[in-house]
Image (tube, rainbow, N blue to C red):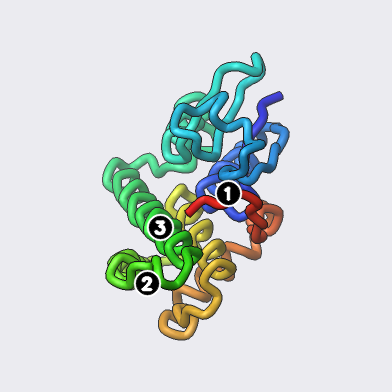
Amino acid sequence: MWTLISASPSPYARKVRIALAEKSIPFTLQTEVPWDHTTVTPQYNPLEKLPVLILDDGKTAIYESYYILEWLEAKHPEPALLPSDIDDRLFAKKVEVVCDGMCDAMVIAFFERMREPEKQSEPWKARQMRKVEGGLRQLATWVDERQGQYLIGDRLTIADLAIAAFLGWFAIRWSEHQWQTQYPALKQYWEGLEALHNFKETRPSPQTMKDQVV
């Protein structure tokens, strides 16, 4: 059986967990805090990042969430999580780029906020939050333009996974943000996804970090 090394709040890992469940691929979940000195992540990913998917041999590792999802689509194409239409497929990947970009910006802002106040850079935090605000506006526009329950067509795609993973994580890491009031249609769309079984089963929870990382 495969093993997925994950962190419980990680939006990157959540995308993969949902994809594996949608494709009915059994796996063992190994939860870690990626910044703790006890993590085994460096043994499998030279970039020391989660998630990491370890195959049956216990050695072969697939890493970086976008690549894991590409790998799963190539190796286990059914049910497809990318549309068959090329333009829709490229759009789904574009949505994932925006969501991953917001996740990256939020990680930077989150750790900046963990520094001692006198060491924090307000311009640096503001730069990251501009990326998030721009991404949220774009997601809201795309959601407003959708035709049904899902973002693209009438089926779940990587675009939905990416948006739900980011918003679910954002809701617990930056709970004071008013995006749910600012973008009610985006909130409604997100809540509809979160009601699905495989989304319910992967809802994020915060972790406590023992090591000083900033």
Three-letter residue code for mark 3: Ile
* Residue 63 visible to an observer of this rendering: yes
Q: Secondary structure at mark 1?
A: helix
Q: Earlier in the sequence, mark 2 or mark 3?
A: 3
Name the foreground residue: 85 vs 45.
45
Any part of residue 155 in sight: no
At 39% across and 67% down in the image, what residue appears? 120
Task: Identify the residue at image location x=40%, y=52%.
Answer: 100
The residue pinned by badge 3 equals 108
Q: Would you call the spot at circle 1 few (<14 residues within 10 Å), some (14-19), or many (20 or more)?
A: many
| Depth check, front residue: 23 or 71 | 71
Query: Is 19 on the left-hand or right-hand side of 111?
Result: right
Comparing labels 3 and 1, the label whose residue is closer to the camera: 3
Question: Sequence-wise, which precedes: disc 2 or disc 1?
Answer: 1
Q: How many marks?
A: 3
**Between marks 2 and 3, how big is the CA–CA gap?**
23 Å
Q: Residue furthest top?
A: 57
**Residue type (three-letter) at the residue carrying disc 2:** Ala
